Amino acid sequence: MDANAAADSSPTRRLSLDVPLLDADQIGRLLMVPRSSVYEYARRAHDPLPSIRIGRHVRFHRDDIEAWIERQRSGDRASDRVAGRM
């Protein structure tokens, strides 16, 4: 994912470095998935995991990750309604 795509996938707001950015290992622990999955989710074309590229490093802002998780939950509920599971 290039820097422009990463910027486009994040909500427009002022980023504060009072809260440190997280790396893929930390996100993997939060989501209970392997680090490789974190990178895969960040690279996917549809609804990627919001990330920030700093040189060759990929970092994540916790607020963006929490918003992404909420979108995943909302999407799951919508598919459950369509499938008649709610």
Image (cartoon, helix red, strand yellow):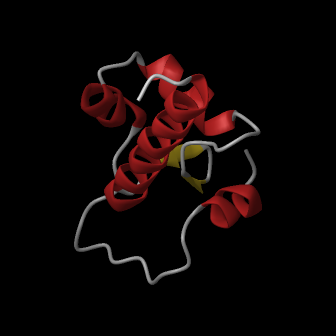
Reply above or below: 40 against 62. Answer: above
Left or right of residue 27, residue 85 in this image = right
The image shows residue 46 at horizontal and vertical percentages of 73, 40
Left or right of residue 59, residue 21 in this image = left
Reply above or below: 44 against 11. Answer: above
Q: Residue at x 32, y 54 (%)?
A: 62
The image shows residue 34 at horizontal and vertical percentages of 40, 15
Reply above or below: 42 against 3. Answer: above
Q: Residue at x 26, y 26 (%)?
A: 29
Q: Quadrant of residue 39?
A: top right
Q: Residue at x 54, y 40 (%)?
A: 78
Q: Quadrant of residue 1?
A: top right
Query: Dividing the image into 4 quarters, which one contains the C terminus?
Result: top left
The image shows residue 41 at horizontal and vertical percentages of 58, 31
Q: How many marks?
A: 0
| 48 or 83, nearer to the observer | 83
| 5 or 23, nearer to the observer | 5
Reply above or below: 10 against 82. Answer: below
Check the image and name the residue furthest to the bottom. 14
Left or right of residue 10, residue 16 in this image = left
| 10 or 17, nearer to the observer | 10
Q: Quadrant of residue 17?
A: bottom left
Q: Residue at x 38, y 41 (%)?
A: 23
